[in-house]
């Protein structure tokens, strides 16, 4: 199913990447199913993947990227997520961090961006805190000014890439009513990361991060000081489209497995696909996949056009992630007893899908954003 019209160049890029993923990444993903992929192995893969345009595809050539549209980069990302959703999340954070670094001071940008684009370093973002989830304005991590430095202390949680990371783009309070993004170098400034066990995505790092009086130069502020909320909203548009696309990739794998099973398995003297209820289920699954995919690429196309798309990216995120839960649940049901065994991948797809409605704003938050965009009336005081 190719629902996004692609140029010959895009198709060639995706096909070349697909062949590499099948030969090199799929065996690693299989070997580390439900086990944390070691950081060294992750770096080997991210450096190889960088040659195909992730995470620097959408970065201008003058800054070391390929100057690709976000849509083209997303086509590559979707293929990676189909092969390994865990590794895709690692790369997703890096491809979100790369454009964020463009707003850093030149000396900071030139120090961290090349390694990130080359897949030689790994980034993470620190917004969520214990007791502070979707309401970023309540963040407690503080950055106290001390001459030419900030002294930063706080705790972050649910941080993708946490234990893998070389640096953290930390959302911190630089004033009573002021939040800023500050880059904290793990080796130079220091922070601790401890992995969190989850029901899915167990092959990648989601961590708690502890920052204890990290002494960071004032020049490490990303963007303008005090503008973290504004920058976060822009980043969320990109992040939510990619979270949605990760869910699309999971759904596509579940659907492909279901089609193969339904056309091979026989019950009551005929193929499963010949039973009307199964045929209807497959049709519904395919429609949910395509609708979700279209929503994600619409948001990405708006990003390419330079148009704000908080409503469209929220639609893509909530619909794709919730449909992933439904489609993967239906895929398990279609497989019967085989669907709940670890010898089939359906249970893994479902466990991963269940997680996706939560990060980067829950489904409930997305609906509030959409409603505010439609009515102009916010649900938050």
Image (cartoon, rainbow, N blue to C red):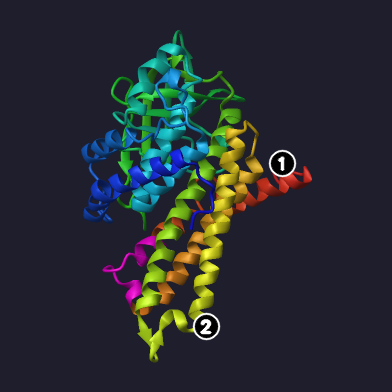
Is 346 included in the stretch rendered in magenta?
A: yes
Specify the quadrant of the image occupied by residue 304.
top right
For numbered disc 1, what is the local secondary structure? Answer: loop
Count neighbours of disc 1 (C-alpha within 10 A) and say few if under 14, some if 14 to 19, many if 20 or more. Answer: few
Whichever of labels 2 and 1 marks the residue nearer the N terminus, that label is 2
Please tell me the numbered disc located at residue 276: 2
In this picture, residue 318 sits left or right of residue 118: right
With respect to residue 244, does 326 lie above or below? below
Question: Which residue corresponds to mark 1?
Answer: 381
Q: Which residues are magenta?
A: 338-350
Count neighbours of disc 2 (C-alpha within 10 A) and say few if under 14, some if 14 to 19, many if 20 or more. Answer: few
For numbered disc 2, what is the local secondary structure? Answer: helix
Extreme residue in the front direction = 8
Identified at 45% across, 8% down, the residue is 147
**Residue 129 seen in the current view:** no
Identified at 64% across, 39% down, the residue is 309
With respect to residue 243, does 107 lie above or below? above
Identified at 54% across, 76% down, the residue is 280
Give the camera-side residue of 86 and 75: 75
In this picture, residue 126 sits left or right of residue 17: right
Identified at 48% across, 18% down, the residue is 104
């Amino acid at each position: 199913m190719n629902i996004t019209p692609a140029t010959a160049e895009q198709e060639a890029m995706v096909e070349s990447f697909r062949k590499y993923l099948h030969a090199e990444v799929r065996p690693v993903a299989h070997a580390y199913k439900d086990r944390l992929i070691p950081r060294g192995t992750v770096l080997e893969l991210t450096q190889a993947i960088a040659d195909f345009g992730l995470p620097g595809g959408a970065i201008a050539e003058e800054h070391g990227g390929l100057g690709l549209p976000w849509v083209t980069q997303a086509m590559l990302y979707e293929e990676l997520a189909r092969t390994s959703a865990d590794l895709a999340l690692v790369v997703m954070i890096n491809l979100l961090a790369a454009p964020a670094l463009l707003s850093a001071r030149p000396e900071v940008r030139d120090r961290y961006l090349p390694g990130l684009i080359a897949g030689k370093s790994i980034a993470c973002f620190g917004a969520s805190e214990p007791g502070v989830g979707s309401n970023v304005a309540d963040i407690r991590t503080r950055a106290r000014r001390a001459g030419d430095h900030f002294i930063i202390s706080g705790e972050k949680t649910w941080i993708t890439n946490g234990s893998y990371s070389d640096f953290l783009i930390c959302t911190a309070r630089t004033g009573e009513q002021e939040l800023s993004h500050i880059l904290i170098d793990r080796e130079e400034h220091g922070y601790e990361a401890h992995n969190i066990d989850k029901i899915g995505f167990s092959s990648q790092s989601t961590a708690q991060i502890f920052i204890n009086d990290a002494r960071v130069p004032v020049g490490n502020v990303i963007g303008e000081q005090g503008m973290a909320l504004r920058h976060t909203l822009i980043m969320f548009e990109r992040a939510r489209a990619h979270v949605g696309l990760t869910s699309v990739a999971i759904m596509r794998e579940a659907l492909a497995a279901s089609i193969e099973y339904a056309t091979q398995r026989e019950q009551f003297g005929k193929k499963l696909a010949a039973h009307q209820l199964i045929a209807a289920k497959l049709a519904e699954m395919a429609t949910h996949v395509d609708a979700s995919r279209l929503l994600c690429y619409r948001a990405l196309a708006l990003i390419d056009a330079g148009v704000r798309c908080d409503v469209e990216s929220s639609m893509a995120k909530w619909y794709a992630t919730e449909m992933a839960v439904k489609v993967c649940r239906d895929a398990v049901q279609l497989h019967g007893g085989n669907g709940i065994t670890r010898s089939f991948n359906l249970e893994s797809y479902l466990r991963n899908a269940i997680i996706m409605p939560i990060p980067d704003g829950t489904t409930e938050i997305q609906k509030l954003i959409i409603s505010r965009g439609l009515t102009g009336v916010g649900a938050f005081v």
